[in-house]
Amino acid sequence: MSFKLKKGKKKIHIIVGARPNFMKMAPLYKEFAKFPEEFEIKLIHTGQHYDERMSKFFFDDLQMPKPDEYLEVGSGTHGKQTAKIMERYEKILLKDKPDLVIVAGDVNSTSACAIDAVKLHIPVAHLEAGLRSFARSMPEEINRILTDAISDYLLTPSPDGDENLLVEGIPKEKIFFVGNIMIDSLIQYKDKAMKSNILSRINIDSTQDYALITLHRPSNVDNREGLLIILNAFEEISKSINLIFPIHPRTTKQIQAFDLEDKVKNMKNLHLIPPVGYYDFLKLQMGAKFILTDSGGIQEESTYFGIPCLTLRPNTERPITITEGTNTLVKLNTVDIINESQNILSGNIKKGNIPKYWDGKTAERIVKIFRIK
Ligand code: UD1
Ligand code: UDP
């Protein structure tokens, strides 16, 4: 190990910024909080996501306290957003001098805060380390590679993560296979989620089948042609099954920019709704016939639930959801998306298993690593 964490009580910063960070950090925050003599925990929210439905809803559902620091960086180009996070977080680091910074996933907040910390010689732990799509055109892949290269503790969700890191020359002693922490939240809240009345709130007859959709990757929604390929497929699929589509703000913006609002509104069985909270979304996943998505986390949650997932991407950084779970990649092609959906509707349902250490105990395993006296 290139450093040792100091002995005695440790001050730790937990960084959140965007929607997929909240359900990963909530269980970790709570596990550290069980040992107040050993850890002082501060929750830092960069403000990368800021709409109530992309942020506050999750603090409520996941029973998280208000952040100790809120950096209010908001949206912007990659350079602008990253720079704002780095400038604002550095000030907090200089003032607060934590002993460890923990970042999660692959969003801009992840790499920006990690870079800030290592340059001040503060150790960094990366939660969800080692995942690779091998597509450097994705901003997330750049964030993953950068963060892993400079982190001191690489906490991986699946063995493929360990393998990728070893190939990149990361020393074995830095790598810890801890399991999938999103599943900690899912297990903790799935009973509460079962009680959500989201279907009646959006006027869906709960006896009818539906497929659930999410879409927000720039490669799918930031050009009109690609977005049309997908919407044309939805149009056709919606003739056979209800589609429920909690729409990401990026996608709403692009549908407006490309003048596609009427096309979406005119699909009779497409139920377009604003982004929903964590319980509501888990409930929608559990009841879905299948899921169409380009999300990272939803590939994993659907594998846990055993619900077929069609991932509208040419690659995934989460290959275990394909080899062990219920996930299938589908090319950006209207016919392929329709055929794969029809395949499921005609009863060809991919069965899967729950991968090792997706067991609700990942936060426990992580905190153990840091409980060195
Ligand atoms: C970000 C992450 C992506 C992650 C996704 C999860 C990066 C590079 N991307 O993508 O990896 O999968 O979050 O949802 O970090 N917007 C709002 N309200 C908000 C947040 C965003 O209206 O609360 C709109 C803004 O117009 C903004 C756009 O969405 O420009 C994109 O937001 P941004 O955080 O840059 O990227 P995401 O697409 O959300
Ligand atoms: N999610 C949610 N409401 C929604 C859409 C997603 O609660 O309307 C949850 C979902 O259950 C998962 C996480 O958000 O836990 C995934 O986040 P997202 O797809 O935004 O990011 P990604 O995982 O692709 O980075």
Image (cartoon, rainbow, N blue to C red):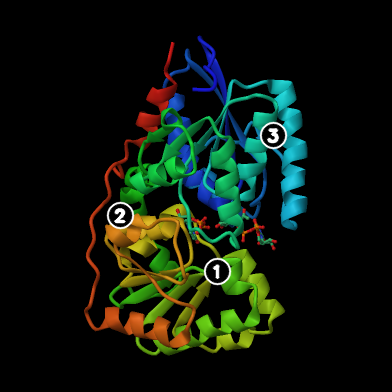
The correct choice, above or below, for 10 with respect to 343 in the image is above
Residue at 58%, 41% (x, y): give it.
147
User: Could you tell me residue 175's position as x and y percent?
Assistant: 42, 34
Mark 3 Cα shell of 10 Å, populated few (<14), some (14-19), many (≥20): many
Q: Quadrant of the C terminus?
A: top left
User: Could you tell me residue 266's position as x and y percent?
Assistant: 54, 89
Discs 3, 2 touching: Cβ within 8 Å? no
The circle on residue 324 is: none
The circle on residue 116 is: 3
Q: Amino acid at mark 1?
A: Ile
Residue at the spot of label 2: 304
The mark nearer the N terminus, 3 or 2, is 3
Which sits in the foreground, 149 or 210? 149
The circle on residue 247 is: 1
Q: Quadrant of residue 344?
A: bottom left
Which sits in the foreground, 142 or 338? 142
Residue at 66%, 37% (x, y): give it.
115
User: Could you tell me residue 230's position as x and y percent?
Assistant: 51, 81
Residue at 43%, 18% (x, y): give it.
35
User: Could you tell me residue 191's position as x and y percent?
Assistant: 30, 49
The mark nearer the N terminus, 3 or 1, is 3
Provide the secondary structure element on which disc 3 rests.
helix
The mark nearer the N terminus, 2 or 1, is 1
Q: CA distance from mark 3 to mark 2?
A: 35 Å
Q: Nearer the viewer, mark 3 or mark 1?
A: 3
